């Protein structure tokens, strides 16, 4: 079974600064996807960024980028120019790729989350 | 296009009571699932379905029941509520691979359930 570990229960950053959230995972699969989800106080789960394991290039979405180290099974999220609206709980999640059989292809395995505070 | 909707948003139950959490999606997604979120635990999969008439257990299925009679709806039933089922429940949906490329799961707004 796959596991996802977020070792930082809480992080804080000054507005306009950069912060990096850590995530490691354990899997024996070669085909998979990794995601970062944001959960603001509204409770809504919002997809921030995704990474396909077969792609060597790190994904970026505006101020959000990842550092994907496949051999080390590490998937960190970097938030640049932090804004007050970035304050939220952030979850790292794993999903098997299409080459793995069965209905659990679509199952997400989540880490325990990192609570990010942005200080003005 | 409402996406994924859940009702109710909040619910308080007494121990032993039963209830159904409703989930509906209007995106014709074959895959639907239920998660529970507890403090310090992340989200854990309860049950999932890859189409009408097909359901399977996730990581924490005990005390919950599901059925899938239509593509749109995936209700979660608590058979006899216990305080350990106090949690926030999320429903999510996504296309399956035969429906086309899919990466994102779409989440509902959640239901906060308290069992006293």
Image: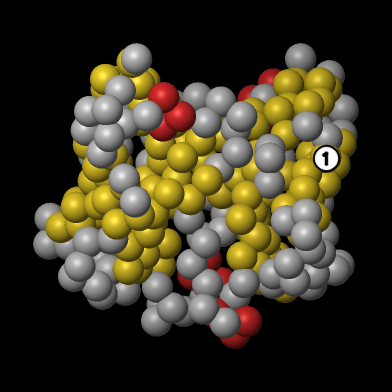
Residue A93 in the image: x percent, y percent? 40, 50
- Residue at image coords 65%, 67%: B31
- Residue at image coords 37%, 29%: A83
**Residue A3 appears in view:** no
Quadrant of the rendering where the C terminus of chain A is positioned: top left
The 10 Å Cα crowd at callout 1, few under 14, some 14 to 19, many 20 or more, is some
**Between residues B106 and B40, which one lies in front from this camera angle?**
B106
Residue B53 in the image: x percent, y percent? 79, 72
- Residue at image coords 51%, 35%: A39
Q: Which colour scheme is used?
A: secondary structure
**Between residues B13 and B70, which one lies in front from this camera angle?**
B70
Mark 1, secondary structure of its residue:
strand
Please say if A65 is above or below A50: above
- Horizontally, residue A93 falls left or right of residue A45, namely left
- Horizontally, residue B6 falls left or right of residue A8, namely right
Residue found at the very far left of the displayed protein: A71
Residue under numbered circle 1:
B7
Residue A116 in the image: x percent, y percent? 36, 26
């Amino acid at each position: 079974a796959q596991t996802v570990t977020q070792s930082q229960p809480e992080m804080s950053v000054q507005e306009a600064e950069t912060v990096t959230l850590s995530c490691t995972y354990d899997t024996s699969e070669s085909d998979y996807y990794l995601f970062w989800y944001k959960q603001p106080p509204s409770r809504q789960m919002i997809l921030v960024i995704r990474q396909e394991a077969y792609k060597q290039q790190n994904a970026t979405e505006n101020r959000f980028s990842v550092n994907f180290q496949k051999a080390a099974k590490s998937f960190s999220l970097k938030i640049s120019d932090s804004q007050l609206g970035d304050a939220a709980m952030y979850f790292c999640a794993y999903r098997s790729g299409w080459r793995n059989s069965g209905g659990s292809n679509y199952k997400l395995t989540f880490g325990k989350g990192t609570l990010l505070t942005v200080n003005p | 296009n409402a996406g994924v909707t859940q009702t109710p948003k909040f619910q308080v139950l007494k121990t032993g009571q039963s209830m159904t959490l409703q989930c509906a999606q209007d995106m014709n997604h074959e895959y639907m699932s239920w998660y529970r979120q507890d403090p310090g635990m992340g989200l854990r999969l309860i049950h999932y379905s890859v189409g009408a008439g097909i359901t399977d257990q996730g990581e924490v299925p005990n005390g919950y029941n599901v059925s899938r009679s239509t593509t749109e709806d995936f209700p979660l039933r608590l058979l006899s509520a216990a305080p350990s089922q106090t949690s926030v429940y999320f429903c999510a949906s996504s296309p399956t691979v035969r429906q086309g490329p899919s990466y994102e799961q779409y989440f509902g707004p959640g239901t906060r359930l308290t069992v006293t």
